[in-house]
Amino acid sequence: MSEAVVAKRYAEALFQLGEEKNTLDEYGDQFRLIQDVLKDNEQLFTFLKHPRISGEQKTQFVREVFKDFHKDVIHTVLLLVERQRIDIAPAIIDHFLYLVNDAKGIAEATVYSVRKLSDAEKKALEKKFSKRFNKQAISFKNIVDPSILGGLRIRVGNTIYDGTISSKLNRIERNIVTANK
């Protein structure tokens, strides 16, 4: 079974559990923190996957680091460590957060811009794109990318809206090249 399928099953089970216990928001916040910790600390991943480190040490470490987290969240991390599946944790968390946001009518988007967007600009984008995607809200993550020269590139799920100067220049170049043939 592929890792994506396994990650999806874990995420769906966590989502159902969170719905039953009415703890989706708490799970979501805590899984976002775990996701950030795993992204920022490659050594932590190595520690949790290392075959020479005993399961007891890993369990004790997880319990100490995440002691204030919901017991179901801790149990999930421990289960992944025990089954040597911690490497799929980011995929599980991504899918889980997608399910939570979808249930709330929220879409997550990434905005690439030359400079950091102001709050007013973000709100204007949220308003426009929430209508376009028929969602109650859109949560934007702004990534500064000087290579786009100007304009915006917005990614919502698998859809990309590219209004950057660099992509327009590339289109003009292609049109000129094909016109000269």
Image: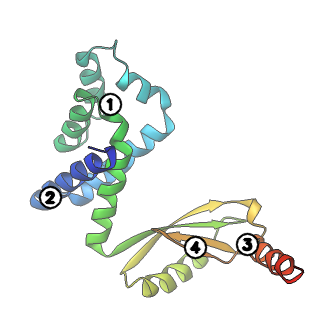
Amino acid type of the residue tagged 1 in the rendering: Val
Q: CA distance from mark 1 to mark 3?
A: 45 Å
Please tell me in which quadrant of the rendered image residue 73 appears. Answer: top left
Q: Is residue 24 above or below residue 64?
A: below
Q: Secondary structure at mark 1?
A: helix
Question: How many neighbours does mark 3 have within 10 angstroms: few (below 14), some (14-19), or many (20 or more)?
Answer: some
Q: Position of residue 25 (x, y in %)?
A: 26, 59
Q: Nearer the viewer, mark 2 or mark 3?
A: 3
Task: State if disc 3 and disc 4 touch (CB < 8 Å).
Answer: no
Amino acid type of the residue tagged 2 in the rendering: Gln
Compared across the picture, whether 13 is left or right of 157 comes to left
Task: State if disc 2 and disc 4 touch (CB < 8 Å).
Answer: no
Disc nearer the start of the sequence (1/4): 1
Disc nearer the start of the sequence (4/2): 2
Q: Quadrant of the N terminus?
A: top left
**Residue tagged 4:** 119
Compared across the picture, whether 158 is left or right of 62 comes to right
Task: State if disc 1 and disc 2 touch (CB < 8 Å).
Answer: no
Q: Nearer the viewer, mark 4 or mark 2?
A: 2
Amino acid type of the residue tagged 4 in the rendering: Asp
Q: CA distance from mark 4 to mark 2?
A: 34 Å
Q: Quadrant of the C terminus?
A: bottom right
Disc nearer the start of the sequence (1/3): 1
Q: CA distance from mark 1 to mark 4?
A: 34 Å
**Residue tagged 2:** 16
- Residue found at x 17% / y 40%: 71
Q: Secondary structure at mark 4?
A: helix
**Residue tagged 1:** 65
